[in-house]
Amino acid sequence: MAKRKKRGPLRKLFCLAVIFIISGLSAYLYFTFPDFVSLKKHNPRKTSFMEYREQEWGKKGKKYTIQQRWVSLSRISPYLIKAVLIAEDDKFWSHEGFDYEAMQKAIEKDIKAKKFKLGGSTISQQLAKNLYLSPSKNPARKIKEAIITWRMEKALSKKRILELYLNVAEWGDRGIFGIEAASWHYYGKPASGITPEEAARLASVLPNPRKYNPLGDSKYVLNRSNLIYSIMVRRGIVVPEYEEVVKEEDKKESNQSEIKGPQETTNPSAQ
């Protein structure tokens, strides 16, 4: 009984010390992080995540360069937007930066695995990490991420957060950042022309874009992209019959253009 009485005060002191440290760090970070208001109208030139990759490449002697093309949300395929939300953050429009249910499940999983990974990150949290932090998963970085996420959600609209995320997210193992660069790299066309199947493929690799390729045939990519696509169909985002008609029309137009060949242009002033 005496031993238990001694442990009680020690535990309380330890908890108070942890709370004090976290509170102090939180206050420091709150007042020292950049002003997010500028992100309302201005795009970041280079993110912290991009700089981290460049340093990583330099140490390994790799001569990769950042490939990125900024594009507005209105010029991104609606299928791609929906696919990414389904894959990464299905509650994006309703939460305030954090999906507490997903975080709880991730913590329980970490406890069982005896590892600190803490998944369940929302798109807002991922954007915070990409813009200002690094890929490390230590507790201090997670505290920073939480504070940045909270402030960013207060300063920016949901549409702007989504637009920023889709433009800075890593999408390949050789410096491919943002959906426009990814669309051209993998499918040879702008993000506005991405089809439902392509959207599901691109969204499926986001958890680990350096390991998985949207064009690959790994079981992970196939299963995850099929699941995303099936959810899109179930929700009425994709109508398979309509997509088949569109594909047939595209084939006809392509065949006709090949038969006709390049069109000659006339100069009206010469007539």
Image (tube, rainbow, N blue to C red):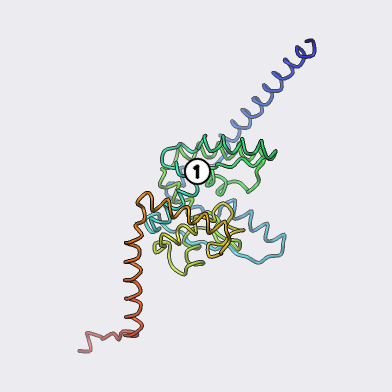
Disc 1 designates what residue? 124
- Relative to 68, is 195 on the left or the right? left
Residue 261 picture location, percent across and down: 34, 85
Residue 195 picture location, percent across and down: 41, 62
State the image quarter where residue 58 is shown.
bottom right
Residue 235 picture location, percent across and down: 37, 49
Callout 1: SS = helix
- The quarter of the rendered structure image containing the N terminus is top right
Pick whichever, 202 or 10, lies toward us.
202
Picture layout, residue 80 above or below residue 146:
below
Q: Residue furthest bottom?
A: 271
Q: Residue furthest right?
A: 3
Pick whichever, 23 or 269, lies toward us.
23
Residue 154 picture location, percent across and down: 45, 37
Pick whichever, 125 or 195, lies toward us.
195
State the image quarter where residue 205 is shown.
bottom right
- Relative to 15, is 213 on the left or the right? left
Residue visible at 67% across and 61% down in the picture:
57
Picture layout, residue 23 above or below residue 249:
above
User: For the image shown, how many numbered marks are present on the structure?
Assistant: 1
Residue visible at 42% across and 43% down in the picture:
158
Amino acid type at mark 1: Ser
Q: Residue furthest top?
A: 2
Within 10 Å of disc 1 (Cα), the crowding (few <14, some 14-19, many 20+) is many
- The quarter of the rendered structure image containing the C terminus is bottom left
Pick whichever, 49 or 97, lies toward us.
97
Residue visible at 59% across and 55% down in the picture:
50
